[in-house]
Image (spheres, rainbow, N blue to C red):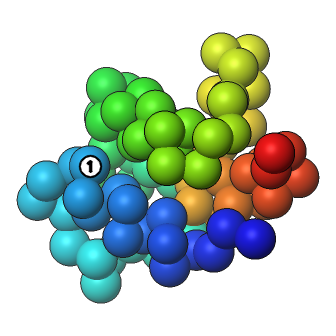
Amino acid sequence: MITMQELKQLMTDVVKGLDLTHIDGEKTFTDVGLDSLDHVAFLLAVDEKYGVNIPDEDINLCYSLDSTVTYLNKNEA
C-alpha cells in the first residue's frame, strides 16, 4: 500500500523548492505549487518508483495527493 507520506517525500524530491509542511493531501497540485510540467514529472516519478502506469486519460484523476493515493492503491500492480 502506497502512503501519503511516501508521495509527499517523492513530490519534494521531484519538485525542488516545495515545502513539505505546506503539502496537504486535499489541496490540488496547483494549490501546493505544481505547474503542469511538475505534475507530469511527479506522476512519471511515481510510475518509475512504484511501477504503476498512469495512462494519459487517467492523469486528471490524480489531481491531489489524496486522489493519487486512492488511484494508485486501486491500480497497484
What amino acid does circle 1 point to?
Val
Q: Residue at x 36, y 33 (%)?
A: 41
Q: Is residue 56 left or right of residue 28?
A: right
Relative to 42, residue 54 above or below: above
Relative to 61, residue 13 above or below: below
Give residue 59's quadrant in the image.
top right
Residue located farthest toward the bottom when viewing the structure as drawn: 21
The x, y position of residue 10, in whole percent, is 38, 60
- Residue occupied by mark 1: 14
Give the crowd class for mark 1: few <14, some 14-19, many >=20 residues within 10 Å: some
**Is the C terminus in the top left, top right, bottom left or bottom right quadrant?**
top right
Kindly tell me whether residue 39 is visible in this rendering: no
Residue located farthest toward the left when viewing the structure as drawn: 17
Q: Is residue 38 left or right of residue 50?
A: left
The x, y position of residue 57, in whole percent, is 74, 16
Q: How many marks?
A: 1
Q: Residue at x 69, y 61 (%)?
A: 69
Give residue 54's quadrant in the image.
top right
Q: Please name whichever residue, 62 or 5, is drawn nearer the observer in this view of the structure.
A: 5
Q: Residue at x 81, y 58 (%)?
A: 73
Relative to 9, residue 53 above or below: above
Q: Is residue 11 left or right of residue 15?
A: right
The x, y position of residue 70, in whole percent, is 79, 59
Q: Secondary structure at mark 1?
A: helix
Q: Residue at x 66, y 52 (%)?
A: 68
Residue located farthest toward the top when viewing the structure as drawn: 56
Q: Please name whichever residue, 48 or 61, is drawn nearer the observer in this view of the structure.
A: 48
Kindly tell me whether residue 72 is visible in this rendering: yes
**Is the N terminus in the top left, top right, bottom left or bottom right quadrant?**
bottom right
